[in-house]
Image (cartoon, coloured by chain):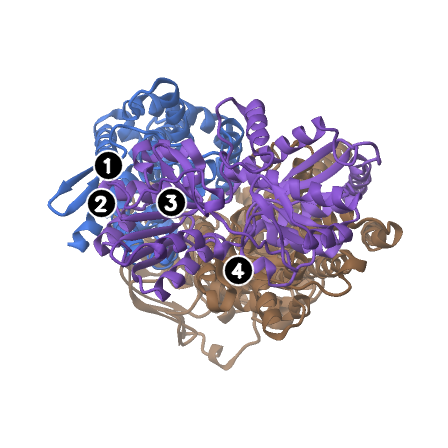
């Protein structure tokens, strides 16, 4: 069934390209149509490129046309200096745009969404200004004018038509490649939840810069061609905020985050633009029309026309589907085997001594404004143990976790993991070293299926891995096995948001195991889920611990903690109050007072 | 002497910009929306003022309450019909919505008023007050004074009225405010209306100081964004400080190196967002540690 | 994602077919049947930065069409104007002229407004071997590629626009002649060369430059400029303005009370009542500007032009210079068509290079790359009206106000 669908889709795509390739041949007197299609191609290229950064990786740029301008001017300046037509410099235009994106990305991608949008606009306008004023290089606001090639009169727009079409094909191929590769999955995970992506081993900085560079590449390539086509370029036209908005509109209308959405959207916007010129009878309402389209799209079809139509079709087709019955008990009872190599690293010399500390925290402090969340914590986690971390609400448990995993930077103190000082390391490096953690409120990538979520973590960084197809490889097999172990195989293809809260927790647990972690840190794994699933989880924890995996668990469920853990630390007001075996802690007066308040009788506190 | 003249121009500019940017800061602070349509609201307020002046000859400053009130109502309607739906989708979508709104307003202004510059002539359009050797052009002085009055009123309102307190509460913690009974929808549309009202008042002042033209909203929003980014995006006092600083920078730029003046604004935006994203007066929140 | 694949593919196909359908229909809608009217294709900035002069140019073209059609049309055919909006965007200009020439297959075209937009227009025209007569677009850059089909329909190119003013100042006796000058110009391909050339000529004649600055188009606050200029105490102030900036700088100077001996601005003072209302009628006294046209000029068809303009757009209105330039451009094209008896564009180009055309701007003639060979007019506001004061042949007043009187507040 799947291969049949694929072939059908491929046929349609081939038809689409074939029509475009043949138009100049079949309709020889179509100079106007070709000029219109060139604009379509341009917008489709720009929308698709933008899609890589903003649709897939989720960093919305409103100033992306800066790269078009960079490509246009690169081609123009080189053309002027060498006397050669600008489109020959298309590859150099692409490289310049990518280099510029690399520079910009390294600096700006650390800002969050509002700031990023504003910065991209500011950069576009700044570059426009610099180009206007750097008269010796760029000709300033007078612009640069080009001689036409000798074949311009006879061939007209047709050579440019094919040049633009080639760039469009290349761009679509690039986006398709990215979407099928683990690189694309990485982008999507960054979009869905950047700090989660970092915690499962994705070097978000590197990925974002890559996304930025790849998104700029098509612009640089097409820009150099566009210069010669226009015959004249100037700063205002080449670095236009309005074009930036139109290309975003194109991607939105078609459907950002999809492959064909931006292409369709590009055509749509180009036609809309032309229609508003032709049918307005001398009174231009173009700006008004584009504004209305933008507002309408954002309000009613933000996911794009293609996706909306597809969803409607799917709903109609799905009317006859039966609702699945979820067999909770079966999940709990499933006792599938687990190949431990799938969830553990090969034993190394450092792990021989089981009484050694795998994780050490020394003198950790973290404040938020005046609130001292973590106020000087020192603790040792023994290798191979299941250690509990308990304490009243607000005692700083999650903050401590976050400092250990690198989600927050500690104000002072050090963290040592497997003998290495990791205090200054990025979250993904810690993940690569074998540190996995789950979150108090489950963090999963909402736009992906369960299987895709499982395959997302990166145990080790590797370029080959990035480019590999996300549907294949040993990770997928491993993921399936782990899912089976957890009893979740039937949910493999479901979107994670279709699962219950408890099931999501199990998925997140399974996800972490993909990292082959030496230590698994669980933040309130039992909260909010039914006893059956808690049971499942406990069994999994015990099985893995028997094989040598260390666990550090934050929990409020006292029976679970007392039953599971070999050692417990009690945190109160940011400091470790008591540490000891479950027995010791249970009977400690200070602990009881911290939880229940002073002057409380102990009767009935039997666990 | 020249420096004092530059400073004087700068402060007059800053005074005007303070009012114009306060609305932007308010909307961002309470609603988390970067309202790029603010420039268009300004310019349309200016056009309305011009139209009324053209028909009646009335002194434009007197129209401040009228335009502000009208824009307030319009703001509430716009928020309720457009933004309410889009706000949950996040900052990038609301920015796009706002941009679309700006385009619609620009297009409408083009169609209604055509493509000629409009300017309002008052008795003081060509006057200038002199203090020793320093010039204070009358339109700018009057606009700045009016701006200051409106800002003080706004400040008092925010500080003393229940609605003002509710706004500040929502800006600090939206969910908390909802929990204590502040209707999120009501306060949001109120905030947007208030932000747009300041744009209306600002528009009146612009009509008195400059010739107006639909496409100028881009220039205004670039400047205002620079100002609130510098001052701290949700902070009104920050907007005032940012306005003063950038007003002086603009006056200095126009005196010594006009081609680079606007680059200062963009540079400020970029550098601020990179190195001190909370601005001069904004606070770093837990959310920032992502 | 996989489930919607099928739907997506289907939708993509539908989209592609629809798009193609639109295209083919577009062909159908656009193609003109060769019927009676003589269609002239025109692109103009009806919106965007140049909307003001663009709108004026449209009126000029329309007045021409109205007069010509009343008179039997051109070569017996009624003319029809096909005007598209290019929104002041260079890219749109290219699309517009492509459409007009290749889709609508117009036999003739006329130019758009401003040098910036006529650059790309001339490229399209050259590639299609169509004559482009431009009502504006005198920037020297346009002529660099040695165009064969481009004709600028004013008396001279941009750098030479200020020559009448320069000549007047330099003709003054030594004792009266100003010794210092201040220059402020917008970074604009047209205004820039005008002032730059003036500055070069004045400096060569020994007039000292005490202030010279270029400002970006989005500049709104001109008081700092006014202060700085006043501080330098120049006797001549020359500004390369477009409109708003001209008004703003003048207002700034009025506010601080600095009035030079002679003041020259490009473009802004040519906007009639808009200009005088903005700065005060009394303050216009003595301001110079270079102009291509005056409504009082005794050139052929001028009176009819003014009369028809007022009939179509409002009694008592003085046509804008841009409207007059558009009218003249159309006159040039008409002369070439009537002179060659047809619409063979290469023949039109040859004819224009060999002949002089009488227009409401006076006689126009061109060199081999389309540069006009005439002289601009020097205009001055006098007693609330505009008069031509130089060259002698075009004078509408023997009066010449110098030095400029002080401002009235």
Q: Do callouts 2 and 3 point to residues on the same chain?
A: no
Residue name at image x 72 percent, y 65 percent: A149
Task: Reply above or below: C192 against A533.
Answer: below
Q: In this view, does B237 lie to the left or right of A231?
A: left
CA distance for labels 1 and 2:
9 Å
User: Picture coordinates of residue C389 (x, y %)?
Assistant: 41, 43
Residue name at image x 47 percent, y 39 percent: B215
Kindly state the secondary structure of the residue where label 3 is placed.
strand
Kindly state the secondary structure of the residue where label 4 is placed.
helix
Q: Do callouts 3 and 4 point to residues on the same chain?
A: no
Which residue is outermost to the right? Answer: A26
User: Picture coordinates of residue A30 (x, y %)?
Assistant: 81, 48
> Upstream in the sequence, badge 1 or badge 2?
2
Q: Chain B is drawn in which colour?
A: blue
Task: Reply above or below: B160 against A560.
Answer: above
Q: In this view, does B222 lie to the left or right of C2?
A: left
* Chain that bears disc 4: A
Residue B281 visible somewhere in the drawing: no
Q: Which of A194 and A133 is in front in this view?
A: A133
**Which residue is denoted by mark 4 in the rendering?**
A542
Q: Do callouts 1 and 2 point to residues on the same chain?
A: yes
**Which residue is denoted by mark 3 in the rendering?**
C288
* Chain that bears disc 2: B
**Which residue is denoted by mark 1 in the rendering?**
B144
Quarter of the rendering containing residue C147: bottom right
Q: Are marks 1 and 2 in contact (CB under 8 Å)?
A: yes
**Which residue is denoted by mark 2 in the rendering?**
B11
Task: Reply above or below: C240 against C287.
Answer: below
User: Picture coordinates of residue A345 (x, y %)?
Assistant: 56, 72
Q: Colour of chain C?
A: purple
CA distance for labels 2 and 3:
34 Å
Quarter of the rendering containing residue B26: top left
């Amino acid at each position: 069934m799947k291969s049949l669908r694929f072939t059908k889709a491929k046929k349609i795509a081939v038809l689409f390209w074939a029509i475009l390739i043949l138009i100049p041949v079949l309709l020889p007197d179509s100079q106007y149509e070709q000029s219109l299609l060139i604009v379509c191609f341009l917008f489709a290229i720009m929308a698709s490129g933008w899609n890589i950064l903003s649709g897939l990786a989720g960093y919305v740029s409103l100033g992306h046309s800066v790269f078009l301008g960079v490509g246009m001017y690169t081609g123009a300046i080189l053309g002027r200096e060498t006397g050669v037509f600008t489109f020959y410099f298309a590859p150099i235009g692409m490289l310049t745009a990518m280099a510029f994106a690399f520079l910009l990305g390294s600096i700006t991608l650390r800002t969050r969404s509002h700031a990023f949008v504003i910065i991209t606009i500011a950069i576009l306008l700044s570059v426009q200004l610099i180009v206007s004023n750097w008269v010796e290089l760029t000709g300033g606001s007078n612009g640069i004018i080009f001689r036409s090639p000798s074949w311009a009169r006879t061939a007209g727009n047709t050579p440019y038509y094919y040049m633009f079409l080639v760039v469009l094909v290349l761009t679509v191929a690039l986006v398709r490649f990215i979407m099928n590769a683990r690189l694309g999955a990485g982008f999507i995970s960054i979009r869905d939840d950047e700090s989660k992506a970092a915690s499962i081993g994705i070097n978000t900085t590197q990925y974002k810069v890559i996304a930025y560079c790849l998104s700029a590449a098509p612009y640089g390539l097409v820009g150099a061609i566009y210069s010669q086509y226009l015959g004249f370029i100037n700063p205002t036209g080449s670095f236009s905020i309005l074009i930036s908005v139109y290309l975003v509109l194109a991607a939105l209308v078609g459907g950002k985050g999809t492959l064909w959405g931006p292409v369709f959207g590009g055509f749509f916007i180009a036609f809309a633009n032309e229609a508003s010129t032709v049918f307005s009878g001398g009174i231009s309402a173009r700006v008004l029309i584009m504004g209305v389209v933008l507002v309408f799209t954002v309000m009613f079809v933000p996911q794009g026309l293609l996706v909306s139509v597809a969803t409607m079709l799917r709903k109609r087709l799905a009317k006859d589907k039966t609702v699945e019955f979820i067999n909770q008990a079966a999940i709990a009872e499933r006792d599938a085997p687990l190949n431990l190599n799938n969830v553990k690293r090969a034993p190394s010399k450092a792990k021989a001594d089981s009484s050694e500390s795998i994780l050490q925290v020394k003198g950790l402090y973290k404040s938020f404004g005046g609130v001292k969340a973590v106020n000087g914590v020192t603790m040792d986690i023994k290798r191979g143990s299941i250690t509990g971390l308990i304490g009243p609400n607000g005692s700083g448990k999650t903050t401590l976790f976050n400092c250990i995993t690198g989600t927050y930077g500690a104000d002072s103190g050090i963290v040592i993991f497997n003998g290495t000082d990791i205090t200054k390391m990025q979250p993904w490096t810690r993940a690569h070293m074998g540190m996995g953690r789950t979150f108090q409120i489950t963090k999963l990538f909402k736009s992906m299926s369960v299987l895709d979520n499982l395959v997302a973590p990166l145990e080790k960084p590797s370029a080959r891995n990035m480019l590999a197809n996300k549907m294949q490889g040993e990770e997928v097999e491993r993921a399936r096995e782990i899912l089976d172990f957890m009893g979740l195989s039937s949910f493999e293809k479901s979107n994670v948001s279709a699962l219950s809260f408890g099931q999501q927790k199990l998925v997140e647990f399974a996800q972490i195991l993909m990292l082959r972690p030496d230590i698994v840190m669980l933040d309130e794994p039992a909260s909010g889920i039914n006893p059956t699933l808690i049971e499942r989880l406990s069994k999994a924890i015990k099985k893995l611990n028997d094989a040598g995996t260390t666990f550090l668990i934050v929990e409020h469920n006292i029976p679970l903690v007392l039953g599971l853990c070999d050692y417990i630390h009690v945190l109160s007001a940011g400091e470790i109050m008591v540490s000891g075996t479950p027995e010791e802690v249970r009977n400690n007066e200070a602990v009881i007072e911290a939880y229940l308040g002073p002057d409380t009788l102990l009767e009935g506190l039997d666990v | 002497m020249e420096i004092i003249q530059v400073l004087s121009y700068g402060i007059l500019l800053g005074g005007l910009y303070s009012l114009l940017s306060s609305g932007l800061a308010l909307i961002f602070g309470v609603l988390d929306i970067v309202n790029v349509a603010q420039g268009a609201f300004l310019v349309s307020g200016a056009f309305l003022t011009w139209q009324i002046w053209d028909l009646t000859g009335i002194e434009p400053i007197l129209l401040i309450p009228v335009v502000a009130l009208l824009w307030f109502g319009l703001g509430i309607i716009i928020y309720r019909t457009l933004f309410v739906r889009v706000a949950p989708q996040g900052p990038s979508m609301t920015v796009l919505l706002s941009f679309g709104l700006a385009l619609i307003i620009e297009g409408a202004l083009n169609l209604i008023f055509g493509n000629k510059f409009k300017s309002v002539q008052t008795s003081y359009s060509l006057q200038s007050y002199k203090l020793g050797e320093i010039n204070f052009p009358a339109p700018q002085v009057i606009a700045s004074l009016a701006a200051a009055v409106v800002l003080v009123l706004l400040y008092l309102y925010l500080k003393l009225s229940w609605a003002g307190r509710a706004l500040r509460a929502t800006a600090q913690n939206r969910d908390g405010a909802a929990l204590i009974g502040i209707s999120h929808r009501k306060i949001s549309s109120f905030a947007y209306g208030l932000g747009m009202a300041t744009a209306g008042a600002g528009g009146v002042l612009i009509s008195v100081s400059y010739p107006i033209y639909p496409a100028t909203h881009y220039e205004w929003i670039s400047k205002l964004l620079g100002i609130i980014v510098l001052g701290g995006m949700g902070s009104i006092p920050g907007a005032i400080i940012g306005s003063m600083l950038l007003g002086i920078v603009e006056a200095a730029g126009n005196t010594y190196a006009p081609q680079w003046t606007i680059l200062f604004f963009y540079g400020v935006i970029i550098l601020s967002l990179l190195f001190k994203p909370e601005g001069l007066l904004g606070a770093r929140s837990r959310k920032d540690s992502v | 994602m996989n489930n919607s694949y099928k739907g997506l593919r289907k939708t993509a196909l539908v989209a592609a077919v629809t798009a193609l359908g639109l295209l083919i229909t577009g062909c159908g809608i656009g193609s003109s049947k060769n019927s009676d009217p003589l269609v002239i294709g025109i692109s103009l900035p009806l919106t965007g930065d140049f909307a003001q002069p663009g709108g004026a140019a449209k009126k000029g073209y329309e007045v021409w069409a109205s007069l010509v059609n009343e008179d039997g049309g051109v070569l017996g055919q009624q003319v029809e104007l096909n005007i598209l909006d290019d929104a002041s965007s260079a890219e749109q200009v290219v699309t517009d002229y492509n459409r007009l020439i290749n889709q609508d297959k117009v036999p003739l075209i006329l130019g758009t407004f401003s040098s910036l937009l006529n650059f790309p227009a001339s490229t399209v025209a050259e590639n299609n071997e169509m004559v482009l007569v431009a009502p504006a677009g005198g920037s020297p850059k346009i002529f660099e590629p040695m165009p064969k089909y481009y004709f600028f329909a004013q008396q001279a190119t941009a750098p030479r626009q200020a020559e009448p003013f320069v000549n007047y100042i330099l003709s003054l006796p030594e004792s009266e002649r100003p010794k210092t000058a201040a220059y402020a110009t917008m970074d604009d391909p047209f205004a820039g060369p005008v002032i730059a050339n003036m500055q070069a000529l004045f400096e060569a004649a020994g007039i000292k430059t005490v202030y010279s600055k270029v400002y970006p188009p989005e500049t709104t606050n001109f008081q700092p400029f006014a202060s700085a200029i006043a501080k330098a105490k120049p006797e001549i102030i020359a500004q390369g303005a477009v409109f708003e900036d001209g008004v703003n700088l003048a207002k700034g100077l009025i506010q601080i009370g600095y009035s030079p001996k002679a003041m020259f601005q490009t473009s802004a003072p040519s906007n009639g009542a808009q200009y005088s209302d903005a700065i005060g009628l009394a303050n216009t006294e003595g301001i110079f500007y270079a102009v291509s046209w005056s409504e009082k000029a005794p050139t052929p068809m001028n009176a009819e032009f003014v009369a028809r303009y007022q009939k179509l757009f409002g009694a008592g209105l003085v046509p804008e210079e841009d409207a007059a330039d558009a009218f003249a451009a159309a006159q040039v094209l008409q002369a070439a068509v009537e002179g060659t008896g047809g619409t063979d564009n290469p023949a039109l180009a040859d004819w224009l290079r060999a002949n002089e055309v009488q227009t409401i701007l006076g006689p126009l003639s061109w060199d081999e790359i389309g540069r006009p060979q005439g002289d601009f007019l020097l205009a001055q506001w006098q007693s609330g009206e505009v008069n031509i004061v130089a060259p002698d042949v075009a004078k509408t007043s023997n009066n010449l106000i110098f030095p400029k009187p002080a401002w009235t507040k």
